[in-house]
């Protein structure tokens, strides 16, 4: 992280030394991704202080910063920025080096009752899968990935981190074991429906990979052929497949395939508990959002009223 410094090694006009910041980064008990997220959050706040000539930030500066971010950032993004800043000042206060000016400052108000992405109706999912040309390795791979995602609701990161050896029986059916959110090993799994398992086998056979520890789905780019795919490559794959069948919307992304799995399972008679377990939601309230969305879609109030008026 690059920060402007003065000759005595302090952040300009803040009274907070770079040594403090480095110690805080080392203190964070999280993954490299978490550390990177918090680092970017504090960097963004630092630039805000520079731009507004703030010498020593106070609580009102945190509130103003929140309102500033909300002018051109989504609430979820603002929340991420604020969490990093709040953690930084909480740590400084615990070390007796700066007041916790972010204490009890409310974050951005998030809508936790509605999804920000749409789901794909089953007929359109079928049309999307049928549109993929499976006469080549890329087509076989893409078909297998999309079939897996839309029938299991796996997160993109789980698809990326899957190895060939992670496919093994779970009872009477083949399954893909993966590292769930909050787990340190691959202890949870999703079942592979026969058409999905067949698609994966056909892809692996054509690929010819023998190493069980190799990525389940390999990159086909010149620079990373056979290597592990990235979040960006999976997202691009999903978006291209959607656009190719006319489903071009900002509300349809790679996450829509997970959203579709949860929604279709409930629409087809799956229980709330079954859907929660399949999607590996730690909180059933997250799964309840699917139920609310379905109930609203089935609510025919507007047409019922219009019928009474215009009939």
Image (cartoon, rainbow, N blue to C red):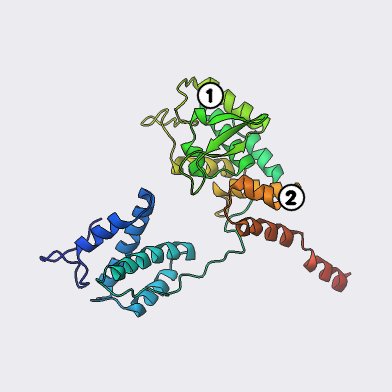
Q: Relative to 26, does residue 236 appear above or below in the rendering?
A: above
Q: Earlier in the sequence, mark 1 or mark 2?
A: 1
Q: Which residue shows up at 16% across the image and 64% down it? A: 5
Q: Would you say residue 140 is visible in this rendering?
A: yes
| Mark 2 nearby-residue class (10 Å; few <14, some 14–19, many ≥20) | few
Q: Would you say residue 135 is visible in this rendering?
A: no
Residue 217: x percent and y percent?
49, 31
Classify mark 2: helix, strand or loop: helix
Q: How many marks?
A: 2
Give the left or right position of residue 215, taking residue 289 as reference: left
Q: Quadrant of the C terminus?
A: bottom right
Give the left or right position of residue 218, taking residue 10 as reference: right
Classify mark 1: helix, strand or loop: helix
Q: What residue does disc 2 label?
A: 267
Tag shown at residue 204: 1
Q: Which residue shows up at 19% across the image and 69% down it? A: 12
Q: Which residue shows up at 61% across the image and 62% down it? A: 114
Residue 187: x percent and y percent?
53, 39
Give the left or right position of residue 241, taking residue 171 as reference: left
Q: Quadrant of the N terminus?
A: bottom left
How far is disc 1 from disc 2 in space, using C-alphas? 32 Å
């Amino acid at each position: 992280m690059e920060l402007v410094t003065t000759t005595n090694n302090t952040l300009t006009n803040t009274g907070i030394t770079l040594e403090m910041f480095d110690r805080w980064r080392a203190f964070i008990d999280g993954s490299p991704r978490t550390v990177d997220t918090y680092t970017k959050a504090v960097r963004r706040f630092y630039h805000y202080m520079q731009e507004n000539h703030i010498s020593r930030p106070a609580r009102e500066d945190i509130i103003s910063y929140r309102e500033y971010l909300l002018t051109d950032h989504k609430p979820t993004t603002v929340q991420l920025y604020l969490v990093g800043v709040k953690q930084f000042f909480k740590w400084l206060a615990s070390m007796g080096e700066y007041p916790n000016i972010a204490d009890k400052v409310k974050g951005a108000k998030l809508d936790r009752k509605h999804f920000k992405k749409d789901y794909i109706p089953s007929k359109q999912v079928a049309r999307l899968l049928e549109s993929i040309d499976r006469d080549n390795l890329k087509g076989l791979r893409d078909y297998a990935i999309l079939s897996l995602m839309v029938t299991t609701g796996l997160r993109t990161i789980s698809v990326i981190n899957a190895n060939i050896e992670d496919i093994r029986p779970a009872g009477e059916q083949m399954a893909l074991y993966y590292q769930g959110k909050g787990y340190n090993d691959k202890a949870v799994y999703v079942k592979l429906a026969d058409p999905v398992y067949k698609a994966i086998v056909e892809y692996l056979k054509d690929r010819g990979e023998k190493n069980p520890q190799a990525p389940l789905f390999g990159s086909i780019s010149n620079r990373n052929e056979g290597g592990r795919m990235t979040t960006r490559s999976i997202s691009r794959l999903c978006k291209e497949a959607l656009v190719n069948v006319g489903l071009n919307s900002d509300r349809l992304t790679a996450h829509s395939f997970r959203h579709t799995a949860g929604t279709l399972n409930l629409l087809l008679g799956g229980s709330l508990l079954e859907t929660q377990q399949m999607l590996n939601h730690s909180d059933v309230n997250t799964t309840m959002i699917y139920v609310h969305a379905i109930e609203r879609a089935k609510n025919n109030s507007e047409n019922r009223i219009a019928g009474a008026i215009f009939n």
